[in-house]
Image (spheres, rainbow, N blue to C red):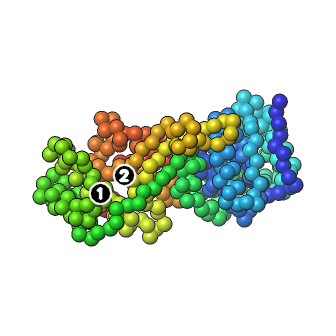
Amino acid sequence: MHQLPQLDRRKPTLTVLLGEQPVPTLVDFDPALFSRVVLLASGTTEPVAYRLRRLLQNKVPDLEVAVAGVDHLHPQELMETVRHIIDHSDGMTRQLNGGTKLMALAAYQAAADQDVTMSYVVGKQVTDIQRRMSLERQWFPVDPEELFALHGVQLTGQRPDPYKEDLFQVAQRVTADWKNEDLLDEFLKLWRKRYKFKPFFEQGISKRQRNNRIAGKAREYNAYWQANRALKQRGVHVINEPAISICEWDGQQKKDISATGKGGSSLKKTPDLVLVNGYDIYVIEVKPNLSDAFSEKNSEQHDTYLFGEFLGRFSKALSSPAIC
């Protein structure tokens, strides 16, 4: 039987018909404007709803957050739910980003003759689609771990190798001329001097493998510190070799099972870099050329690319010179 959400007294309300991406809700939500958020979720978007509810309640304790189940096969029930929310709201904004076309139409029709703002989010822009005007929203900050958690992903950052000017200079030269064995030997010598307890290749490998490992470490070192210098001052989070795991959703407990919990994770990878700019996530592999980075023969890079696609965000493998 269809159940309507239990709501407190009339409040300024943001109602969201959820899709698979949680970010439009963050863009549209402004704690200065709304004291209630109602998340309309179907079976496939239920995890998104409960992740959002957990985040919003943790960051805004006084905020009322309700999750209401809807069925895309029964638009009449959705219309009934939207009208119920309107009756219990002191002004409502209705976001139309998610759901099927039929659900979006039903939600629109339910609120069309009411004093309701219909919003739509594109990137960082919120638009009133009836008045065809931009809506001002205060930025709602989240940290990288919280942003990844909204996607059902556990992120564990690693401490970068400390900056050393002489090592950085040689790393730049190796990046530009990564087959130069003299440069590779110079980088290895400096690395062993600075970090004698941090070897990055095992003994007994071939000379070719050895040189590839040295060149790879030099590119990663160069890429991290180039990105850190150029982007950190702009507010971009530069995360070095993080461990990233896709968690499993527990429908009974309404929460994700962490990578260390029961059931484990379906994917755990360590890309070279992750950049987080606002709500945008960039998953980066640092390789000498793009064909290497996207090749299915290189499973680490290819899986990282697929992980970026899973996040629904821009993921691209970059050569180190492209970061400079």
Tag of residue 198:
1
The x and y percentages for residue 292 are: 28, 42
Residue lying farthest to the front in this orientation: 197
Measured Cα–Cα span from mark 2 to mark 1: 17 Å
Badge 1 crowding class, 10 Å Cα cut-off, few under 14, some 14 to 19, many 20 or more, is few
Q: Quadrant of residue 50?
A: top right
Q: Earlier in the sequence, mark 2 or mark 1?
A: 1
Which kind of residue does numbered mark 1 sit on? Lys
Residue of label 2 = 272
Secondary structure under tag 2 reads: loop
Secondary structure under tag 1 reads: loop
Badge 2 crowding class, 10 Å Cα cut-off, few under 14, some 14 to 19, many 20 or more, is many
The x and y percentages for residue 7 are: 84, 49
The x and y percentages for residue 299 are: 34, 37
Q: Which residue is drawn at 48% across and 53% down?
A: 156
- Residue depth check, mark 2 versus mark 1: number of the one nearer the observer: 1
Question: Quick check: 1 left or right of 94?
Answer: right
Which kind of residue does numbered mark 2 sit on? Asp
**Number of marks in picture:** 2
Instruction: Specify whether residue 170 is in view.
Output: no
Q: Which residue is drawn at 37% across and 68% down?
A: 229
Quadrant location, the N terminus? top right
Question: Quick check: 245 left or right of 58?
Answer: left
Q: Residue at x 72, y 29 (%)?
A: 73
